[in-house]
Amino acid sequence: MAKYLVTGANGFAGSHLVEELLRRGHNVACLVRKTSDLRYIENLDVEFVYGELRDPASLERAVTGRDIVVHNAAVTRAFYPREHFEINTGGTVAMLKACAGAGSKIGKFVYVSSQAAAGPSPDETPIDENCDPRPVSAYGRSKLLAEKYVLSYSSRFPVTIVRPSAVYGPRDRDCLANFRDAARHISTIIGFGRSLLSVAHIYDIVQGIILAAESGESAGRVYFICHNRAYSWLEITHAIAKVVGRRTINLRFAGETVKILSRAVTGAARIGRTLGVCKKPPLLTIERGIELSMPFWVCDCGRAKRELGFEPRIDNEKGLALTAEWYRQEGWL
């Protein structure tokens, strides 16, 4: 049994990770804020450590006595690009410093990065960990910079980086809009050509993270975590319509149109924030619009399969069905 610390433990991916670690018999501490919504983990057998990535003292308390630190906390949507760097990069550096202060007691630091750190693929050919990263958004650049800091600490304690692809599953609010649109007989498709993207169900992503944490061969390594094959927007939207049980009309948007819409939405949200009526960034931020406008987001999980024994088990159709079922049970759909 290992003693884990998980940051971002109350969120979509973090809460699933905590549940799986507990199922495997591990001791888990969760770094959360006093204001965090704990609905998914409040009844679990975990230790809550209250702190902030901007509060070094709280981070030192959190990592003390932990064998493995999984740094999962991140800002995926923000009003301004600098917010990504303040939390995603700055917060990671703060966690690394706290772990270094704990000395040799830290057995592994696992950084949950993102496919966005590597950037889109030039074409349908999947990129792997040997490809030069070319992030296109502030989010991706902030995660890549954080990766570089993580690797710079590899002489102090073992570090491993995982790059999940686009992820979906129960508790995910980002994909919820696609399911609700399908329920209204609408499918939104980005791009007019052969756009492809790698995706994975949250259960597979969690398995990949834990394998990376537990492997003795993963120190200093970077791993893409995704499904074996990529899917087109058309395949994904048709699969969602099927599990929702609706016939849908396809609404196609060119990449440039998405970027224009994202600028308008973000501009309105920034004004709303100034006026005090918009507290959270919109789903379609400028940075997200840039990412969505790229036709190919395809990565290769071959290294994770060879070195970690990772094997995705939930295909798109099954995963979307499980997600739709959970949405219905919770009254979200």
Image: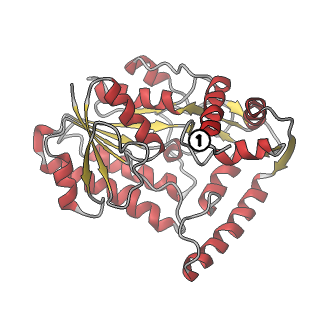
Give the residue drawn at x 54%, y 48%: 134
Quick one: quadrant of the N terminus?
top left
Give the residue drawn at x 81%, y 51%: 253
Give the residue drawn at x 84%, y 47%: 252
- Mark 1 lies on a secondary structure that is helix
Task: Please say whether residue 198 is visible from this viewpoint.
Answer: no
Quick one: quadrant of the C terminus?
top right
Provide the residue designation for mark 1.
330
Task: Please say whether residue 91 is visible from this viewpoint.
Answer: yes
Give the residue drawn at x 45%, y 19%: 305
* Residue 4 to residue 59: above or below: above
Image x and y of residue 156, in percent: 17, 42
| In this rendering, position of residue 313 left or right of residue 100 | right
Image x and y of residue 169, in percent: 57, 36
| In this rendering, position of residue 304 left or right of residue 154 | right
Query: How many labels were placed on the picture?
Result: 1
